[in-house]
Amino acid sequence: MSTQPIQPAVRHGEPLLAVRDLRVTFGRRGEEPFRAVDGVSFDVRPGQTVGLVGESGCGKSVTSLAIMGLLPTRGNTVEGTAVFDGEDLLSLSAQQMRDRRGADIAMIFQDPLSSLNPVIQIGRQVTEVMERHQGLSRKEAMPKAAELLERVGIPDPRARLANYPHQLSGGMRQRALIAMALACQPRLLIADEPTTALDVTIQAQILALLKDLVVETGTAMVMITHDLGVVAGLCDEVNVLYGGKIVERGTRHGLFARPRHPYTVGLLDSIPRLDAPRGEALSPIPGSVADNLPWDSACAFAPRCSNALDVCVEKTPAWEGDDVVGLRCFNPMGVSR
Amino acid sequence: MLRFVVRRLLQMVGVLLVLSLLVFVWLRSLPGGPVSALLGERQTEARREALERALGLDQPLPVQYVRFMQRAFQGDFGVSTQVLPGEDALDIFLSRLPATLELSFFALVIAIALGIPLGYLAARRKGTALDTTSVIFSLVGVAVPVFFTAFLLKYFFAVEWNLLPVSGRQSIGLDATRVTGLFVLDGILTREWDAAWDALKHLVLPSLALATIPFAVVFRITRASVLDVLDEDYVRTAEAKGLTAKVIRGRHVLRNAMLPVVTTVGLQVGALLSGAVLTETVFSWRGVGQALAEGFLQKDYPVLQVLIMAAAAIYVLVNLLVDITYALIDPRIRTR
């Protein structure tokens, strides 16, 4: 099994991807524009795995699609910068972006069945990336595709090349998608809820595979998930998103050991634990994202927050911190008053 | 695949058997009938009975049906009583088929050549002037009756502006050699270019008139289907791979979007081949549709039976072809 190590084109320590003040607004005719991502900034360093965590609708997927240039252009505005290897992805032309996607930056999606073209053989779906970016012919790319399938743990890869997506199991499909993403040895991999549609045992396998692959190839990864278990197993650094803004950031160990934002605490408390006494009810976060206040004049999370003060509905909490640790909260947990 | 085809062919026999019974009973339950149509005002009780006996219509229906089926299995579908008295009914169908084939083929080519690209473009530019115009145009195409479109075309292009022939398949007096009965093809095969050109000119208006509905249907299905596919996750995956717009369009969007279009085209082929009654009548096109109209007007049971059964057989066969095409495009069906 040969793996080509990636060339460290970026000096270690310098971010490979630096997202600054990313704002995405959805505008539909006759509707109030909706700000899905509201000033998100984060860094991803080479070889690092960064998590974007939050519940549905917090803007984590939109963030990744905006970086990839995959948001529909009509009615949407994307502001801010996303500097990848010295180049702002958001100001590239559509054609330049096409050259980066799949080659330098690759993406894995949530639902492996619907993300694969049902009428095209798996092999072809793997080779087409290499044909596009590495100038290989289909014939030249086929053995490489088999190698890739083997590398992501698909048994009998040569036979699988001729299979169609419906002939593979869910886990195998996600492995195939990962193989496609890794085909051109990207330096950054964005994984958007890669395990959500899978069985729990398969989830663990896929996460282990991703972990092995990023370690092996040195690929940096942005892991988008609502599942803190995934974060705990995989991410070096975690960003917790709420209502389109990052509300807390920390290293994996720091965040799990000492969560400070009430929302992060709520997320951790709503995970079922084996060591909790039997019969003890889970403590979900009350309310839903529909209760959010506008960030312009309050903390969006205040209506659902167990720790809210008067100031929380009067002013926007400012970001306090840096690119490693930070918090956006007037009244963090664990601070006595 | 072979088992699938054989199974479908066997099913087709069943369909045709049931249909033969329905057609048989249905035709005979219509008021009037060949006897009164033949005799007209010279009708007397004695003549009626004599003719009924001669045609075998005095027997009870089940007996008539069994006899009909016995002969049909030997390829004998009876003799025309009115349309071309004395002529074998099956021969009438076969002699009319090339005209209908030729007309349907051109109409279908027009419908597909316009419908699929326009449908794709309309979907890609959803909400733009191009989209709205084509949608309205296709609505009009479906809504306006074919005989009206046919008359309009004929009035302006043939009568007023004298650009194209008024009716028929080829100019009278043109000494063209017949090979297949498809006049344009015959002209090309025999290198009688003037004959081919003349036949082609005759084809333009009828095939345009006939194409309006299939065009509208193909256009609308293509548009809807492309819109669906553009929203699919696998198109986003293809975009995420950085594939070129051309590859995404051809390999990922169109191939999947064509699935419902294939079904629709198949249904349209079936409908076209069973005879374009209105168009053929307006343009005096001597095809199956015109024979069907004549047969109905004159209550020619044998001719009608052959034409309807043949139409059904063609319909089922075309659908089989559609299913095979479908299986070729979509592997999910092949392995089932």
Image (tube, coloured by chain):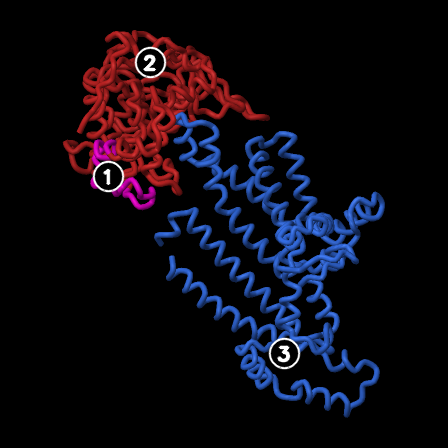
Residue B237 lies in magenta, yes or no? Answer: no
**Residue range of the region highlighted in magenta in the rendering:** A147-169
* Residue A170 x, y percent position in the rendering: 29, 41
What residue is rendered at 68% in x and 46% in y? B141
| Colour representing chain B | blue
Q: Could you tell me how far apart the alpha carbons at marks 3 and 2 are, in whole angstroms?
A: 82 Å
Q: Is residue B50 above or below residue B267?
A: below
Looking at the picture, do discs 2 and 1 lie on one chain? yes
Under circle 2, the secondary element is strand
Say if mark 3 contacts mark 1, CB within 8 Å.
Answer: no
| Colour representing chain A | red
Identify the image quadrant of the C terminus of chain A. top left
User: Tag on residue B78?
Assistant: 3
Seen as rendered, the residue at the extreme bottom is: B46
Q: Which residue is mark 2?
A: A17
Name the kind of residue labelled 2 in the image: Leu
